[in-house]
Amino acid sequence: MEKFLYFQNTTTDSVCIPARKLVEMEMDFSGTALDLRFAIGDSALDTEYEVLLTVSDNTGTEVMKGISEAIRLGKDPFIVVADDTDSEYIHSSITGVASFSQIA
């Protein structure tokens, strides 16, 4: 079963990406931002997409584990990672969606 990761930061700004396209999760040096990168496409010319989440201080490891477990063990194909409009988050340490954008 294919799973999808959903992010929303306003009522008109959201994205849903296949979980299999997630290629990297990385905390920034400040410990309050988690960067998720996705490779969209099936060739060497893949487009990269980036979702930046804000998290509580130094909780990135726990958030990454929560996302990974939802992908691997969850039964729902639609995974709400962060929805600022409805205040719904996959992990209690996520405080919001800072941005999402195409980067390549």
Image: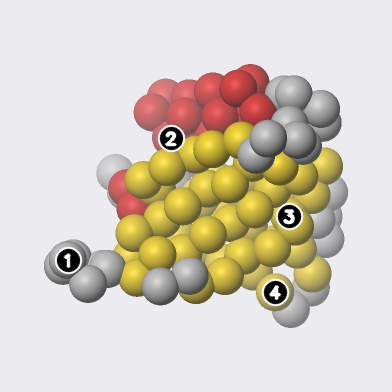
Asked if labels 2 and 1 touch by Cβ distance under 8 angstroms, the answer is no
Along the viewing direction, whichever of 93 and 83 lies nearer the viewer? 93
Q: Dot 3 lies on which element? A: strand
Viewer-side label of 1, 2 = 1
Label 1 to label 3: alpha-carbon separation? 28 Å
Instruction: Give the Cα separation between the discs numbered 3 and 4.
Output: 10 Å
- Residue 68, can we see it? yes
Q: Distance between the Cα atoms at labels 2 and 3?
A: 19 Å
What residue type is disc 4 on?
Answer: Asp
Residue at horizontal 48 percent and vertical 25 percent from the top:
69
Q: Amino acid at mark 1?
A: Ala
Farthest front residue? 29
Picture disc at residue 44: 1
Res 13 label:
4
Where is 35 relative to 44, above or below?
above
How far separated are the C-alphas under marks 2 and 4?
Answer: 23 Å
Q: Amino acid at mark 3?
A: Val
Residue drawn 54% across the image and 23% down it: 65
- Most extreme residue toward the left, as rendered? 43
